[in-house]
Amino acid sequence: MNDGVDLNRGLSVLDRPNSYIGKTVPRPNLDRLMQGRGQYVSDMSLPRMAHVVFLRSPYAHARIVSIDAAAAKAMPGVIAVVTGRELAEVITPWVGVLTHLKGLKSAPQHAIAIDRVCWQGEAVAAIAATSRALAEDAAEQVMVDYEELTPVTDMRTALATETPVIHPDLGDNLAFERNLDAGEIDKAFAGSDEVVEAEFVFGRHTGVTLEPRAVLADWNPGDQRLTIYQGTQAPHMVQNISAKHLGLEEAQVRVVCKDVGGSFGIKVHIYADEMATYALAKLLRRPIKFVADRVESFNTDIHARDHICKGRIGVNKDGTITGFEIDDLTGIGPYSMYPRTSAIEANQVVNLVGGPYTAPNYRARARVVFQNKNVTCQYRAVGHPIACSVTEGLVDLAAKKIGMDPVEIRRKNLIADDAYPCASPSGMKFEALSHQASLDRLFAMMDYNALRAEQAELRKQGIYRGIGIASFIEVTNPAAAFYGVGGARISSQDGVTVRLDATGAVICQTSLTEQGQGSESLTAQIVGSVLGVSMNNVRVILGDTDNTPYGGGTWASRGAGIGGEAALQSAKALRSNILDVAAAILQAQPGDLDIVDNAVVDAAGGAQRIELHELARIVYFRPDTLPPGFQAELMATRHYVPRDYPFAFTNGVQASWLEVDPNTGFIKLLKHWVVEDCGTLINPQLVDEQIRGGVVQGLGAAMYEHCIYDERGQLTNANMADYLVPMAGEMPDIDVGHVVSPTMESELGAKGAGEAGTAGAAACVANAVNDALSPFDVTITEIPLTPRLILTALGVA
Amino acid sequence: MTAPVPIQLTVNGERVEAQVLPRLNLADFLRDQLGLTGTHVGCEHGVCGACTVRVDGEIVRACLLLAVQTHGMAVETIEGISDSGEVADLQAAFRMRNALQCGYCTPAMLMTAQDLLRHEPAPDREQIREHLSGNYCRCTGYHAIIDAVEATALARRGEAS
């Protein structure tokens, strides 16, 4: 079902007979997951495998005075107790900076803390034993003497002169600052009829992948190779980083990524405890398995957001938005995460605020500060929810100030669909977006006017319902501009190898990984379509650095747009090779032949000439019958990365319909709508499900999810009973619609869709809550929107 | 009491005799001693539902039950109800609706959905949401899962979805 509106394009390789592109087909290989026969790292076991448990600091900031492991070492099953100093013999420390983020600084971080711990949960020792339970027993007997230091917990005072500096060598607690001044914001505000401002507060939350981070590292001293089984989004990055810090060549490390129980950006980083596990395998010369338990996940999986952003918007009485200004402050914990850094989100906020709108005047400041809390870093929709909530919150405030409908002010100010290519005030290049068409489609899908009438009617009965709208831009298909230009060895290109096997089936090896998004499906759909081969004859191999082309992996909504195009180009190359063989066998011209339904046919008329399994049989087993000098090549590799645009920007708009109970502060979500434009839809159902999953993560941030620290830097709700996540009972049905503006940069035309849902959901809910509460004349600009927060705003808590 | 305790039970219809430590929970017993890795561990304290299995016909959280407590009982896991074909239609509906992404919650989600359909053959969407509300899914947003369960219920009642 493709209910999108194709804005351009004629026939292409995507329109071949029996094409799978644009069709909803089931993902291959779901059965083993549904039968409990998946292979997650937490399920894996190897001969002589030991389990590691990390003893973690109970303090947010403390000096390690001494560690006494004698009693633990004598316990049953214990293989070793290793301190940071001992582990440093086999693994070097790292500093998480990128050169293109000018001024970004961080301190050297060790796999296990040596002299000092900087957040509650930082590992101080590793205990390896024959079972996890025995390792935990022993961990209780490791005696650590700490001298507690003053923790820096409040980001508002992190830069104050009286606040201790976490890393004295760095001089202050400022990790990164970026300033941007585009247009003439002071003049714009001075000339505006109204200038509205607010302070937006975004709680810390985290990914809560259902399978915690898991790694099994196997150093084989016999062949001097390290095999790392890990649920990761970027196997080649893990290969590079682990080799670098263990003093190995890349070729000595193999990273295997089988099934992954959730990722969302949580598993695109390399954590200190994972580095320690690799190093322990090398040190102890045996396989070591680490699976975080849930408390460890909350304390050490990267956290995200944690921003306080002051925003201002200028607006004229006719609804014209004149400019935006923001001052963003974000806390990232004691280190910038490695190797992607923790400054990317603030940078992204600066890039994205005001992005959907025509106003050319924009001033931004973002400051990133260190704290003694767990590290924050890239999580799904990096920076998007902050930028969208600030922008759309301000737009609603402006509309309210001048008495204009929220849809009307957006129609008036969103960039026109015929204005492209153009650039945002922050310099982001837009190839082709569809804000206006998307808003029109949303307006129709949700029957906006009927909802407004219903809202007014119910309000007379004391029922407070609200509508929230949020337009957004979304960064997808990142090329080298994210990391490569800053010196990080994270591949921005992806590669696919396709080969026809001896039975006429097709094997693809892709550098994408699969965490449930559908990388396997989209690769098989594209290759099957281009080659004229049935999808069930296409097998996809991924997640193995020994057996796939070098590439980036699956993150930042790049799988379909980058890995998908590589699949298309490699399939085209193989198709050409197959037709050369067929022409040689059939004494025909390659251009007169085509491949349809697993057979070579006459391009004109479609008469079948030779089936692919017969062609493959001749090539592999009877090459003596081919013309002299003809060498068949039934394998082809192509790589792809976008060159013209550093990112493929996409766009969309969401709406939320909800009810607020002013007596209890509870929000009941009633319905959610999304319209988004990811260009070519390869599998509409998979796109819709990416959107829905993303929306619910955004709704979680809006209403429930919050990593709550006390003033001593203690995470007080590090379990799933206290850290609330969206469950089926509270979530609404989510309608998804599409507008289709393919990127002209690739033949496939696909842009990403993974961030869209998360990007706008919280902004929608916040705007809808404020709309619902408009009779009470309160405005809330903080998430999560807990009952207490709402009741406090209403003056009844 | 820290010595292993002998237990006898059936797991997916097979007789099992084992020595287990009193502190060993059922999820770890199934996974680590029997190699039945379809029962997943998510939160380890009864909140996420990923370890849901059937004990004597009722769904329980295997992380909240000790292995010794299952002595003399019948335990069924996703492997068992898959091989018997009991949930084949539900699995087909999940496949058609893409009601799973990473698949980590899915075995338990199927266990719980099947439990609902055995007790309530004609649930509405709200009842489905309610019954599944103890099973955490981070990927799908639940909508597709509700659709798949609803479609299965309709099909089992002989109605088209």
Image: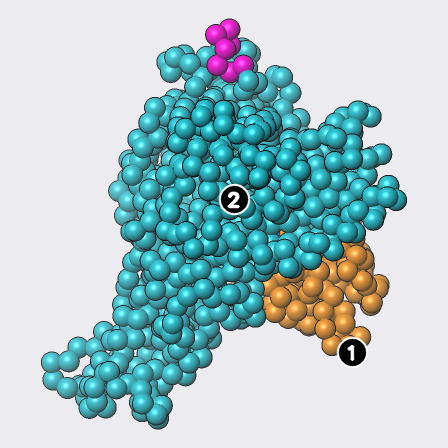
Chain colours: A cyan, B orange
- Asked if A583 appears above or below A334 in the picture, the reply is below
Q: Which residue is mark 2?
A: A413
What secondary structure prevails in the magenta region? Answer: loop
Residue A77 falls left or right of residue B41: left
Left or right: B121 as drawn, with respect to A575 = right
Residue B47 lies in quadrant: top right
Chain letter, disc 2 residue:
A
* Quarter containing the C terminus of chain A: top right
Report if residue A159 lies within the magenta region: yes
**Quarter that holds the N terminus of chain A:** bottom right
Which residue is depicted at the point 49% across and 44% down?
Answer: A356
Measured as percent of width and height from the top left, residue A516 is found at 53, 56
Where is residue B101? Give x, y as percent. 57, 57
- Tell me the quarter of the picture where residue A391 sits: top right
Q: Which residues fall within the magenta stretch?
A: A157-163
Q: Chain of mark 1?
A: B
**One can see residue B109 in this view:** no
Residue type at mark 2 is: Asn
What residue is shown at x 84% (from left), y 64% (from top)?
Answer: B120
Q: Is residue A101 above or below residue A254?
A: above
Question: In x, y percent, where is residue B18?
Answer: 69, 52
The dot on residue B158 is 1
SS for tag 1? loop
